[in-house]
Each structure stands twice: as structure tokens, then as C-alpha cells.
Image (cartoon, rainbow, N blue to C red):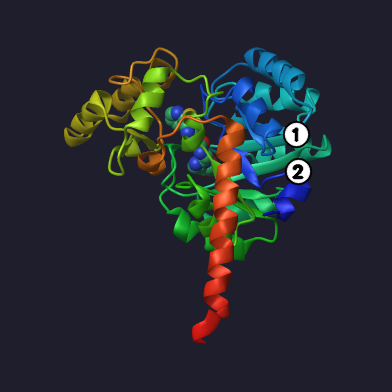
Amino acid sequence: MLKSNICSLLNIKYPIFQGGMAQISDAGLAAAVSEAGGLGVIAAGNNTAEALKKEIKKIKELTDKPFGVNVMLLSPHAKEVGMLLIEEKVPVIITGAGNPGKYMKLWKEAGIKVIPVVPSVAYAKHLEKAGADAIICEGTESGGHVGEITTMCITPQVVDSVSVPVVAAGGIGDGRGIVAAFSLGAQGVQVGTRFLLAKECSVHSNYKNKVKNANDTDTAVTGRKTGHPVRVLKNKLVKQFKDLEKNNAAVEEMEQLGRGRLYKAAVEGDVDYGSVMSGQIAGLVNKEQCCEEIIAEMFEEAEKIMQGLSLLVSGGKDE
Ligand code: TUI
């Protein structure tokens, strides 16, 4: 059984986090992942504290296992959400899309485990000093808001720069990805795209089908000029973004084009003009399974690969 110090830190069976995908990762999905032995994560996204409070109530009814809440720091409600999480004594906070520095002390004093997502070594070092319990380093293969560095490159560099456990994210969709992440020194993985096809994931079926049918080259990054680049599956909206970029359009015009597009795709099912956020691993993700099957299958695969690799090293008969 593949265990790591992320398991003992968070009291979970498998060292896997389900990505906190805005508008998608709700209490139902997170509870299913936590029940299956991973860390289920509710995404606060742009939600108000009031809306999030209902999801937290739901997950507490659905599972008594540890869970996390992802705080999207670009949200106008980030501060009230951050305070709610203290009141609710959530076990784990994961942050994304910004610097959680100003909240760290309060969260830590409340006994919450804080695990920021970082896109670079400098942020990892800074947040370890500020008290992070672990670091998620996210490669540009991920869906949604992305940094520039690949998982293959950022993971070993972050691992060498901090002493807290590192969780790798971006491009991990099966057991091979888990082994790769552990080989790079990670102690756990965060997986988003594969959980889009989980039976317990309530994202619109059009969104699921677009991920299911995607190939390796089907994602694109839009909005680099806005300072908030986002990886999505190519569609008519992406074409509009690329046209604006070609014509050197103003940042405000691009931001305007992006507004409300994730809701359009994830909730309304408009996969032509909505923002279908997905990682580059979508080409490999094509089975609908329940969370328990996804996690068990990924770790069975990983363990088999690790055993095979160790045989390779010990040489066998030819040596
Ligand atoms: O946050 C994510 N992924 C996301 S957030 C999201 S919602 C959204 N929608 C439209 C525009 C922007 C966001 C969809 N997907 N992943 C974690 C992550 N964090 N990736 C990169 C970062 C990050 C980036 C900059 C973390 C810190 C950071 O610091 C910048 C600064 O100067 O504060």
C-alpha cells in the first residue's frame, strides 16, 4: 500500500487530493473522495461565505472523514470565506490563484492545516516560512488558472527548496502519473481533470462529454495578457479570445469576454461559448467511474508500476 507522510499529516488513506475546481467541486464530489480515502475538496471559487456554509454543512452530514476547502484568492469574497472557515473549523484549507500570506497566522492559530498551491519555487519558500503545512506545486499542464512551469520541472525544484511535504499537481490522470510524481520527490498528488468524469461529479453532462472526447492537443491557454491565464478545452470562445489577442485588444475587453464563462459551461452546459477548464491530461481521461473506483484503480496501477521498476533495478537473471 502506497503511504506517505501526507497520509499521516491529514489522516487520510491514500495520498491524493481532489482538485478544488471552481463551480464544480461541491460537497457531493468532495464527500465521495473523502469517503474513498482521499482528501475531498470543496471549491469556494467566487461563492459567498453564505453559499459555502451550506456546502460545508452538507459535507459534514455526508462524511466524518477529513476534507478540505479551496479558497480562490482572486474572489471578491475571499476574506469573508477565510473567516468562515475558521468558524467552521474545517480540517484543511487549500489556496489558489494568489498569495494567502495575510491569512496564514489566523488559520494556523485555529488549528487548520494550510496547504497553498504555488506556481514557483519562490512562493513555495515564502509560504513554508509563513507556516504552510505542505505545498502543492502545480504545473502548467493543469486546467484552470495556470503558471508557466511544467510539473516535471517544478516538482523536484520545489521538493529541493522546502522541508514540508510536497504534493504534485498538473497532468496526473492515472497510476503512471502518481509514480512520476513520487519519483520527482512528491509525497502526494492532486488530481482535477479525472474527477470531472466521476459519477459523483455534478458538472453538466456536456462538459463531461467534451472532456471524454478530448485529445492531447485539445487544450489552450487564454488570457495570458490579463495576468490570469486559464487552460481550457478549445471551442468557439477560445477562437474569440485568440482573435482579440491577435488584434492586440485591451485587457479590459478580454476580461469582459471571460466573465461568467465558467458558469456557462459547468452549470448551463454551453461548451461552445463557455469556459471548459480542463488539464492537458484530458486526452487520457475517458471513463466515467465512481470516486472509489478512480482512486483504487490509480493506486493499484501505481503500486504495480513501482514493483516492476524495482525488479528492473535488481537486475534479475541476466545480471
Ligand atoms: O487556482 C488555481 N486554478 C484555478 S482558479 C480558477 S477560477 C479563475 N477563473 C478565472 C480567472 C482566474 C481564476 C480556475 N482554476 N490553481 C492554483 C494556482 N495558483 N495556480 C497558479 C496559482 C498561483 C498564481 C499566482 C498562486 C499564487 C500566485 O501568486 C501571484 C501573486 O502575485 O499573488
Asked if residue 194 lies left or right of residue 220, the reply is: right
**What residue is rendered at 37% in x and 27% in y?**
276
- Which residue in the protein does label 2 denote? 10
Return the mark for residue 66: 1
Q: Is residue 234 above or below residue 158?
A: above
Q: Could you tell me which residue is drawn at 52 percent across and 74 percent down? A: 312
x%, y% of residue 187?
64, 55
Q: Which mark is residue 57?
A: none
Where, by quadrant of the figure, is residue 70 drawn?
A: top right
Hey, which quadrant is residue 89 in on the image?
top right
**Above-or-below relation of 188 to 284:** below
Task: Find residue 145 and report its horizontal and vertical position in percent.
Answer: 44, 37
- Quick one: label 2 or label 1, which is nearer the N terminus? 2
Q: Is residue 125 left or right of residue 285?
A: right
Considering the numbered disc 2 on the image, is that residue within a helix, a strand or a loop?
A: helix
Examine the rendered structure and indicate whether residue 115 appears above or below residue 196.
below
- Between residue 106 and residue 147, name the one nearer to us: 147
Q: Residues within 10 Å of mark 1 (few under 14, many from 20)?
A: many
For image coordinates 41% across by 19% down, the residue present is 205
